[in-house]
Image (cartoon, rainbow, N blue to C red):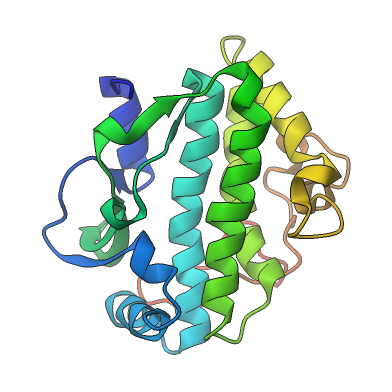
Amino acid sequence: MTKLTTDQIRQLNMYSVYVEQPEQPLFTLKDLLHAHKIDSVLHAIQTVSQSPNQTVAASYFLRRFGMFISMQFYQLAAYDEIWSGNLDQFIFGAKTEYGNPSISMFVNKGDFVDVPEIERKKMIRHILHDECHAIIQQVRSVANISSLTLWENIFGFLLWHYHVLLENPATSEEARMDLTLLKEDNLWKGIAKESLFARYLKGHEPSALLNTKVRKTCCLSKDVPGLMQCGFCPLK
């Protein structure tokens, strides 16, 4: 267990991750991964987000969860820490953000742990397989949406964070180490035949892809009330 700094908590809050109990809890990460609960979970997501159908709700949710995943990689590069708590203590709750009803994430601040350098590759594999891939597969079991769309929803946040982290001399070394690992095909075994993030980057540095149509699919945020078309949209 490690103690989060005020700056860490502020950064988490900017990406809709809060270290407090939600006023309107909806479901837990454990519920999300339960085969018999995923239908009711997606219904709750669709209701809160006011999405017109399950496909839009699924994409909306992976953009929200993608903010948490991006924070996992940000905290890893900047502080050598990640969240590693119990699934039933990771709570998704309804919260108004920027005037819109939103699905936000709530965790215990005591559930962040130090990651030794020798464990770094293992932790990145865990995030990709047990957090990202597991959630994407579960959501796709009830929603008609491509896995590429959902992965790209996560990658958009990673792209920005690695741009920032690599530009900062205080975090550039760790960020480069993590980015190199993310591009290794063997870390994606059981998920894809090759690194999906390397395919997304197409050999470019993250900074080179900002403000470009880097996505191949539409995230459908334009169909969620209160949101608009994202900057990476291929439909523009």
The residue lying toward the viewer, choosing from 158 and 214, is 158
| Residue 162 appears left or right of 28 | right
The residue sitting at the top extreme is 169
Tally of numbered tags: 0
Q: Residue at position x 60%, y 87% from top?
A: 144
The residue lying toward the viewer, choosing from 2 and 173, is 2
Residue 61 location (% of width, % of height):
44, 67
**Can residue 153 be seen in the rendering of this structure?**
no
Residue 193 location (% of width, % of height):
86, 58
The residue lying toward the viewer, choosing from 46 and 215, is 46
- Quadrant of image for the C terminus: bottom right
Q: Residue at position x 40%, y 69% from top?
A: 32
Q: Tell me if residue 135 comes above or below residue 83 in the rendering.
A: below
Q: Tell me if residue 70 comes above or below residue 170 in the rendering.
A: below
Residue 113 location (% of width, % of height):
40, 27
| Residue 29 appears left or right of 147 | left
**Can residue 204 be seen in the rendering of this structure?**
yes
Q: Residue 30 appears in which quarter of the rendering?
A: bottom left
Q: Residue at position x 53%, y 54% from top?
A: 131
Q: Residue at position x 49%, y 76% from top?
A: 58
- Quadrant of image for the N terminus: top left
The residue lying toward the viewer, choosing from 68 and 30, is 30
Q: Residue 148 appears in which quarter of the rendering?
A: bottom right
Q: Tell me if residue 195 comes above or below residue 146 in the rendering.
A: above
Residue 24 location (% of width, % of height):
14, 64
